[in-house]
Image (cartoon, helix red, strand yellow):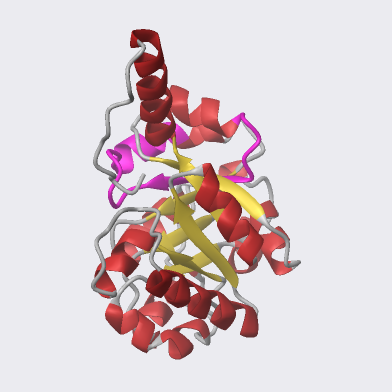
Amino acid sequence: MENKSLAAWRRGEQTIGCWLSLANTYTAEAISRLGFDWVCVDLQHGMVDYTDLRGMLPAIGNTDVTPLVRVPWNEPYEIMKVLDLGVQGVIVPMINNREEAARAVSACRYPPDGLRSFGPMRAAMVSRMGYAKNANSQIACIAMIETKEGMLNLEEIVTTPGLDGIYIGPADLALALGLPPTGDQPQEEHLEAVQRILDACKAHGLAAGIHTSSLEYTQKYLALGFHFVTLGSESGHMMKNAARELAAARGAAEQRRESSGY
C-alpha cells in the first residue's frame, strides 16, 4: 500500500494535485483520471460530507492518484474515520502549536506511535495485505499553518515528531497577516510569510504544500520549491472555463467574480 505521493515528497520530488469540493462521483473520477499525482477531498469548506466521501473514494480508487482528505477540524474521531475509509493522508486545518500538531499525528498512528483505534474497514480491503503493519509509515499527516499563532509557533510545529508535511491556506494566512483574502495573494508581505514556512519545512525535512487557484500561482510556487501544489479545484476549473467561453460566445468581456479561494 505504498503512498506514492508521500514517497515522492520523501525523495524531495514535486507533485501537483487537485482539490475536490463537490459531492459528485463522476467529477471525482474524471479529475482523478487526468494525471494529477493526488487529489484532496475537502470536508472543511467543500460541499462534501462523510457520506459523500464514502461514495467518492471508490471512484477515485479506480485510478492511480493518491487520495487525501482535508478534515473539518483537528478532531481525532474525524481523522480516524476518514482513514478507515482508505484515504492515504489527511490535511488538518488551523494548527496553532506543537500540542495541536501532535494531536493530529497521534490520530493518524496506531500504538505505540499514536492513539489511532483499529478498525480499518475499507482501508484494509483496498490496501491488499499488510495494512496494520504499514499504515503508520504510509499515512501522510499534514498540518495547515495559516493563523497568526501558527506563524508565531512555526518552529515548534515543523519539529513535531511524526509530522509529514505542512500545507498553506493562502487566504487564511492573509487574514492572519491583516491582508484581504483574495485566494492567490499578490502581496510581498504574504510571499515573505510563505517563504518562511517553506524554508522551515526544508530545514526539517518536511514536505511543503500550498493551495492555488490559478496556473500562474501553481507555476510560481513550484519554482519556489514546494513539494506539493494544488492546481485549483474541479469547481474552480468548471466556473472559470464556463465564464471564459460564455464571454467569448457573446463577444463580451468576462464578468468578474469574487474569489472564493478555489
Picture residue at 38% right of the left edge, 20% below the top = 242
149 to 36, vertically: above or below: below
Residue furthest to the top? 249
Q: Nearer the viewer, residue 144 or 232?
A: 232
205 to 6, vertically: above or below: below
Magenta-colored span: 33-56
In the picture provided, is 240 more to the left or to the right than 220? left
Residue 249 percent location from the top left of the image = 39, 9
238 to 204, vertically: above or below: above
Q: Report which quarter residue 106 is drawn in.
A: bottom left
Q: Nearer the viewer, residue 176 or 93?
A: 176
Q: Nearer the viewer, residue 215 or 262?
A: 215
In the picture provided, is 80 more to the left or to the right than 134? left
Asked if the magenta segment contains residue 52, the reply would be yes
Picture residue at 60% right of the left edge, 75% below the top = 206
Residue 235 percent location from the top left of the image = 37, 33
